[in-house]
Amino acid sequence: MKTRLTLLITFSFINFYALIAQISTTEVYLLTCDPGPETYTLYGHSALRLYDSSSGTDVVYNWGVFDFNTPNFNYQFASGRLNYMLAAYSYNSFLNEYRPTKRSVYSQRVYMPEEELLKLKILLNENLKPENKFYKYDFFRDNCSTRIRDILEKVYDDRIVYPEKESKVKATFRKRIDEFHKGVLWMDVGMDLLLGNPADEECDFQESMFLPEYLMKNLGQAMVVDGDKRVMLLGPTEIIFDHERPVYDTGIFKQPWLWLSLAFIVVFLFTIFIKNRYAQNAFDLAFWSILTLLAFLMIFLNYITDHEAMGQNFNMIWLNPLIPISFYAIYSKHSLYWFWRAQIAFSVIFMLVIVLINQSINPAFIPVILILIIRSYYRLAK
């Protein structure tokens, strides 16, 4: 019995010292990846790398992973109910994801004394447990970047200090993501349509780190209180892959509001001068079909999905749930004048309250709303 106890104690000490030795040779890095061409890569990506020089172990912890084999994957994704998860895999495998798309990858060593490193490893191992690795993704509040920010704050017990001057600079979540839409102006219109009032809440220095680029930038200005001194949380930036970001043409002829304004002028002239009833009905069928699809999408995002950022959307005033009635109103023997009056009223009310509501409205919406008013008035005047 004594022999077994002695062996157990000896084995425990060996494991303890092995763990300490491994910690002393482990380096932690924040990895940041540039935006990519696909919609889901438009805002970049963040991950943590733990490299042990003594054993050669090189692992990346990535909170941006989801399982394509999830039942009803497309619906789960669209409804905001798809579980994201933490995955740990080799550093080389992580880099191989970015080589083909020519996206720059940056690395910054994280200041991590042995005590904090041990705590980080415990938290990571706890996060990797099957019952903990899945989480409900939230674009603004809980994603691959905020998870890194939060775990580092836990490791240091809130001893991370952000620059006071920078902390007072505030924007909104919408303005932050607009910075990444310069090359996809039509997508910017779509995002402004789908994102509701929560996107216009103030986004301070710490909250801005929901974006990988801001996580890299803002943590790079953070200090750690270590005893009686302060140390920079992140070291200098090392470029792993260096690729130039594409330069986008954002001139006036690329602006959606210009083309939609021209469309409004064409529709205005068409409404006045084209007397052919079949042409008018064909146009209305196409126009109100598009609005109907958008109205159903607004209903789905606001009342059926779990996407909090897309709720409380004032665009539902002009893209209202009554719009699908347009088909019946066009082809029925009943004129349904109340319907067309309601559409004009909703649109005018929306235009009047734009300056009062706490939601940023994309200027490209205005010509579309004017077309809606014109076509509704045309139906009233028939």
Image (cartoon, rainbow, N blue to C red):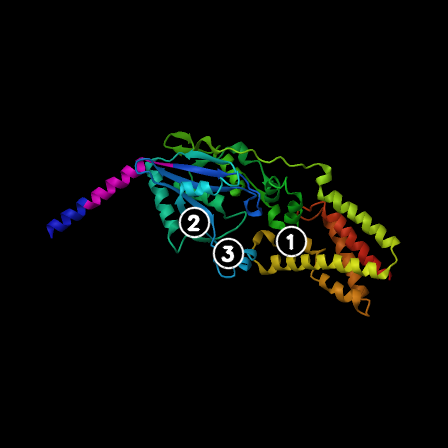
Can residue 322 be seen at all in this image of the molecule?
no
Q: Circle 1 — which element?
A: loop
Q: Nearer the viewer, residue 357 or 284?
A: 284
x, y percent for residue 286: 75, 58
x, y percent for residue 218: 50, 35
Give the left or right position of residue 239, taking residue 58 as reference: right
Q: Circle 2 — which element?
A: strand
Residue for badge 2: 86
Q: Earlier in the sequence, mark 1 or mark 2?
A: 2
Q: Is residue 81 magenta?
A: no
Span highlighted in magenta in the image: 11-27
* Quadrant in which residue 30 is drawn: top left
Mark 1 and mark 2: Cα distance apart in space: 31 Å
Q: Amino acid at mark 1?
A: Asn
Which label sits in the foreground, 1 or 2? 2
Q: Circle 3 — which element?
A: loop
Give the left or right position of residue 76, taking residue 113 as reference: right
Q: Nearer the viewer, residue 34 or 195?
A: 34
Which numbered dot is residue 122?
Answer: none
Residue for badge 3: 82
Mark 3 and mark 2: Cα distance apart in space: 14 Å
Mark 1 and mark 3: Cα distance apart in space: 22 Å
